[in-house]
Image: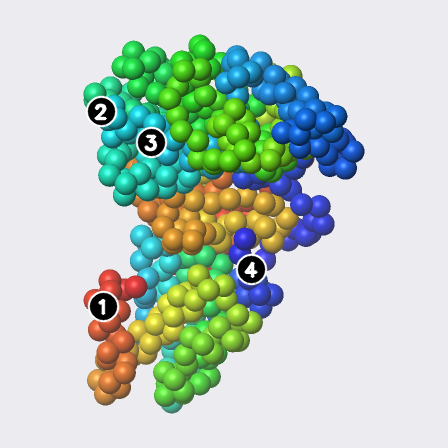
Amino acid sequence: MIVVVMSTRRIYMDYAATTPIDPLVVRMMLPYFSEKFGNTASLHQEGSEAGIALERSRKIIAKILGAKETEVYFTSSATESNNTVIKGITWANKEKGKHIIISATEHDCVMESAKWMEKQGFEVTKLPVDENGLVKIEELKKAIKKETILVSVIHANNEVGTINNIEEIGKICREAGVYFHTDASQSFGKIPIDVAKMKIDLLTASSHKIYGPKGAAILYIREGVKIEALLHGGGHEGGMRSATVNVPAIVGMAKAAEICNNEMAEESARLMQLRDKMIQNILKNIEGTRLNGDPVKRLPNNVNISFENVEGESILMMLDQEGVAVSTGSACSSRTLEPSHVLTAMGLEAKVAHGSIRFSLGRWTTEKEVNYVLEILPKIILKLRQISPFKTKI
Amino acid sequence: MMNYSKIVLKHFRNPHNLGKIAKPDGVGEVGNMACGDVMRLYIKVKDDKIEDIKFETYGCAAAIATSSAVTDMAKGKTLDEVLKLDYEQVIKDLGGLPPIKVHCSLLAIDALGEAIYEYLVKNKREIPEDLEIKHQKILTRGRH
């Protein structure tokens, strides 16, 4: 029996899944629901008021990325941005070739879009990663051929937090004359991004991962890149994304990005300290644990640990009962009953992947919360190991 | 989101009949590590009744809760009665299971059947036809 008083306050350690909206962001958004509600495509004052807010937002995002304003397009989600890249680039460039390269640890929306392209007759190469989840650069060089039209590599992985060497990958692609896309959903707002320096042709970033609202994301498309739109219609977003523009969400995303950018250095140092405390404490105090992902090239807020001989969903449910929200790469938690493709691509055996838990920290994570989790976690693992037929050697 | 019933969560937090039996009359093991659930069930039989029953489970909350519920249901019952338990009854007793977790309840029933199978073989007793078919299925499926 775990003798911890059930806290009424929840401890949220799943910031990589989604984040609460910053109150400052909410305040920025509010006027755009009922007062400044215009359609950006309308010619009257209401329309231009909304249009001004949209362009101001675009300017903020462009500045953060080191991009031109005309290169930033707003979409509804990272899934939409990634789908637009995979489907739009292949469609517009199929005369050049029908080969695309992705990494084995992309988010499902890239994996599934690529799978769909395979059905349409395109060839997809999945780049292997090393045991820490880093894309093998040599394999990328080998995989590029004259028919290759796109390389898509995730900037920082959503499950294990490993940060790929995007600058080097960008350089290789630029030299080979192949478009390079990176899904920066987890890294944007957390670590510096410079599209020019990193030689990025296309980039995806999301609002709800950075304390902005759901329903807004961006797609950066470098000037001159040949791409087809996913949504056709009234010609919004320069024809790249027809649909009435979600002004409140976009205004929110821009404000959220601005706050993250201004506080980045300080906030990432604070989170890294909490992250490292958690990792060191768990590895030291709980037998049969391992850190998943790169220990150094790692997002400041990601802790991903595998616990031997216990199953991740049961750890998650036990933590949830004690007021702590986390996520797992276990098969039992997925719709397909398959363990995480990211962990298996890193060479983890299924049983190690089943026992993985991701703690992702954020703006409102305190040292006190970390201490509470570190206090209850060993008891939970011990309890589940007592239930398990497999015993951990001590 | 995983919507577990209150009864499931109660069994999960404080499972009944947890552990091993020192000299069991039968042990049933089903599932495998690659799939993410393994259930081991121990029985002690007296006068053709389940006198004692214990389990160890590696798996999700549903797997642990169904193990606990099945051992509760089997305890004190005759072997014939126990062999008639079905997964639908287990699910009902647990106040429902999310659809994706229904297989967990099958696993617990299978583990129980396997323990009884071992007991009957050890005691050179006749194996009911249904149980034999189930046992062969479990073997060919790689204990899952």
- Residue A359 on image: x %, y %: 53, 38
Instruction: Check contact, mark 1 vs mark 4: CB within 8 A.
Output: no
What residue is shown with label 4?
A: B3
Helix, strand or loop status at disc 1: helix
Q: Reply above or below: A125 against A225.
A: below
Residue B139: image tag: 1
Q: Chain of mark 2?
A: A
- The answer to whether tags 4 and 3 share a subunit is no
Q: Chain of mark 3?
A: A
Residue A56 seen in render:
yes
- Residue A337 on image: x %, y %: 38, 54
- The answer to whether tags 3 and 1 share a subunit is no
What residue is shown with label 3?
A: A91
Q: Reply above or below: A192 against B14.
A: above
Q: Is residue B137 left or right of residue B93?
A: left
Helix, strand or loop status at disc 2: loop
Q: Residue at x 53, y 70 (%)?
A: B96
Q: Nearer the viewer, residue A171 or A93?
A: A93
Residue farthest to the right? Answer: A35
Q: Amino acid at mark 4?
A: Asn
Q: Residue at x 54, y 39 (%)?
A: A17
Whole-angstrom CA distance, mark 1 to mark 2, is 49 Å
Residue mark closest to the camera, 4 vs 2: 2
- Residue A355 on image: x %, y %: 42, 46
Q: Is residue B100 left or right of residue A45?
A: left
Instruction: Check contact, mark 1 vs mark 2: CB within 8 A.
Output: no
Whole-angstrom CA distance, mark 1 to mark 4, is 32 Å
Instruction: Check contact, mark 3 vs mark 1: CB within 8 A.
Output: no
Q: Chain of mark 1?
A: B
Q: Reply above or below: A206 against A316.
A: above
Mark 1: few/some/many CA within 10 Å (<14, 14-19, 20+) = few
